[in-house]
Image (tube, coloured by chain):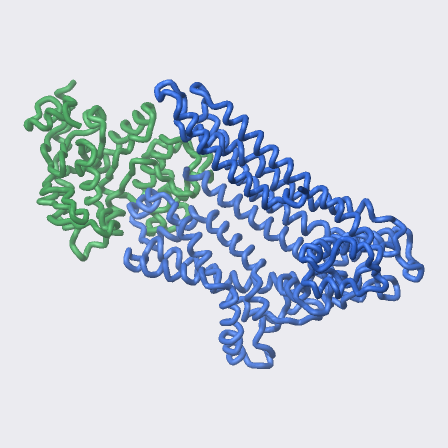
Chain colours: A green, B blue
Amino acid sequence: MDDLRRIERTTDMNDTKISAKGVQVYYGETHAIKDVSVEIGDKTVTAFIGPSGCGKSTFLRCLNRMNDTIDICRVQGSITMDDQDIYDPRVDPVQLRAKVGMVFQKPNPFPKSIYDNVAYGPKIHGLARNKADMDGIVEASLRRAALWNEVKDRLDSPGTGLSGGQQQRLCIARAVATAPEVLLMDEPCSALDPIATAQIEELIDELRQQFSVVIVTHSMQQAARVSQKTAFFHMGHLVEFNDTDQIFTNPQDPRTESYITGRIG
Amino acid sequence: MGAFITFPAVLLLIVLLAIAGYALGRRKALSFPAQSTHSRPHQHAWHVVFATAAPSLLVVMLWLFFAGIASNIYTNMVTPDDLVDVRLSAQAREGLTEREIDIREGVLRTQFVAGVRSLASALDGYVADGNATEADIAGWNAEQDPIADRLRAGGQVLGPAVTNGMLSVAQVVRQFDRRVGTVGPIISLVLAIAGFVIALRRISAEFRARVVVERWISGFLIFASTMAILATVAILAALTLPSLSFFREYGFFNFLFGMAWAPAGDVVGIPEGRDGSYQSALGFVPLIWGTLYISLVALLVAVPLGLLAAVYLSEFASRRARSWVKPALEILAGVPTIVYGIFALITIGPFLQAVVGATVMPNTVSVMTAGVVMGMMLVPFISSLSDDVINAVPQTLRDGSLAIGATQAETVVQVILPAALPGIVGAIVLAASRAIGETMIVVLAAGALSNVQGIEPNPFGAVVTVTTRIVAVLTGEGSGFDSIDVLAVFALAFTLFFITLALNLLAQRMVAKYREQYD
């Protein structure tokens, strides 16, 4: 059984979706990310783990250029997606972000109806030609986020009225509605109870069919459960990047071993 | 003896006792071995201070407050019903129903009581200054002596005329006031001494002074917050009684739906018209029309400018720009309104007249003149409140929208403003209530007609507002305090108070609703 899964994993990890080389990030004087190079595969879940403040979220936010919104933040090095440099001046971060969706730590539905929350991105990017199109996108996105059956009768009620786990799945639906190729998740379960967490984890595994998923998590069990590749960050360095089962069963770096056995963190 | 027990002297004594209490309490507490005491020495000391000063000072305050009310009631009680001052003459009674006579005599009585009270305090002041003895005053006769002139010459303030009836009642009231004025200080002094002695005796090693002092402080804080509420209640009370007597006299609906405002200085209780009505036309409609019209123009100027400024400051401005623009806006908020008024009068008014022409805008004062400048005054008000509200929108919402690929402008319009909307509406409502109550700008720039008929639709025409009419009547030479016009002004203030109160409550509810969403 275990072997079968391993085969499935290796066959899945064919192409590289995002490739980062020598990435440095500075917050003013602080050197937050130090020379990180990593290859993120297509149709793969890649987990970033590491202690608080190690830079994993900062690095994640480099991948859709969310760091651009912070004045004092500077990014150096090269990050390419499908061999296209995403920090090229000709790349519009707004278009990039339509291709790289993001889900945040705390569920952040907009103060709009459930329908409008999902329709927000498609409307902005002009993905639907008419109302029927939009209805289709909304339904497909909500289905993909495993939320459709729970909300199909109340699409007009406010998104903020849902439970925490439903809100987070609504945010996932919102992110997949723009038909992204990559989905970034910044500790998507840290504000949720265990049942909602399990639902989201199951969902992540399904999302892998269509997207390349990058997830930042504090929970090593979660990384082990949902990811095929794991990157361990420590103090701004990428310490180790390998297949998830390798990282958790046979870590190469002593720092990784200390972290996964609970000695640092 | 009686002469020494006055409130100032007693206050001084209480303060001295409190200081002595601190020293003695501390010394007594220090005499216990440090390990065995529950509370620290300074807590014991403060316990004595509070017990000495707090109840006695409270009594002083309550006494000063209620003595006036009690004296008012007493004056009313000792005023004989058949006194000629409070009766309508047979001539004035002609053709009036029993009820109308009652109303008018009630008004006369209220005025008489006020006149007596001011006469009484004038006499007190006159004697205290050494201008006359009590025996002199007892021999005065209002029909022969120019009493009012005499008192005014002595630097006293009082109503227009003094009658013998007023004089005799005033003497009775003065005696009552003297008695009340002596008993109050004695009670508070006794309380202070009692508190001082008891508190000092209670100090022991086990006495929990820390807890007691904490309780005193929380009581003190509760008291302070209650005072603010009481001030509102007091304002309301001061406005309510004259307003109610005005409504009774003039008719509530005549006032509220009256289309003309033309005070003629009628004396209260004595209508001059043929059918027993007043010649003063005291209709609310033209005034509230002017007020609302100007406020509307002001909001039309202030809301877009203020809101856009707030959006710029909170979402687009770099840190450097923000550090310049925000203080500049706050300077605008600190400009006294009279300065805005002068600016409106000498700059904006002539400018508008030059632009639209003198046929449309005959005067430099107009709705637009006042409204535009008032709008400028409100810009920082709206921008600073909206800025706070917009900043309170969680950063995660911004991130969420940007991460989908929305531009900053799309994020502001579609996510941030809807999220901040209740708070922004609250800010606008607060600004509206300021615009309605604003006085100095409209006094200078809206127009100063003393006779208004109906409503003025032209935005470049002069109007009057509620506040300008209050100022005009109360500072005008024509109307004394016995005129119906002055009572009408109380009704104006009363109505204005309720309009702004309602708006503020509305704003508070909206802001509260907004807070619930994101806490």
Percent x, y of residue A81: 16, 46
Q: Is residue B198 above or below residue B288?
A: above
Question: Residue at image x 23%, y 33%?
Answer: A209
Position of A64 relative to A152 (above/below): below
Report the number of numbered marks: 0
- Give the percent coordinates (x, y) of residue B316: 32, 56
User: Which sits in the foreground, B324 or B395?
Assistant: B324
Residue B42 or residue B518, whichever sits in front? B42
Q: Quadrant of residue B320?
A: bottom left
Which quarter of the figure is the C terminus of chain A placed in?
top left
Residue at position x 7%, y 26% in the image = A254
- Give the left or right position of residue B404, taking residue B465 as reference: left
Picture layout, residue A30 above or below residue A88:
above
Query: Which quadrant of the figure contains the N terminus of chain A?
Result: top left
Q: Tell me the quarter of the picture where residue B132 sits.
A: bottom right
In front here: B165 or B233? B165
Residue B252 seen in render: no
Near-viewer residue (B4 or A80): B4
In the picture, measured across the screen, residue A145 lies left or right of residue A205, that is right
Image location of residue B245, percent across then percent down: 76, 52
Residue B309 in sight here: yes
Q: How far across and how far down the image is residue A44, in percent?
A: 18, 34
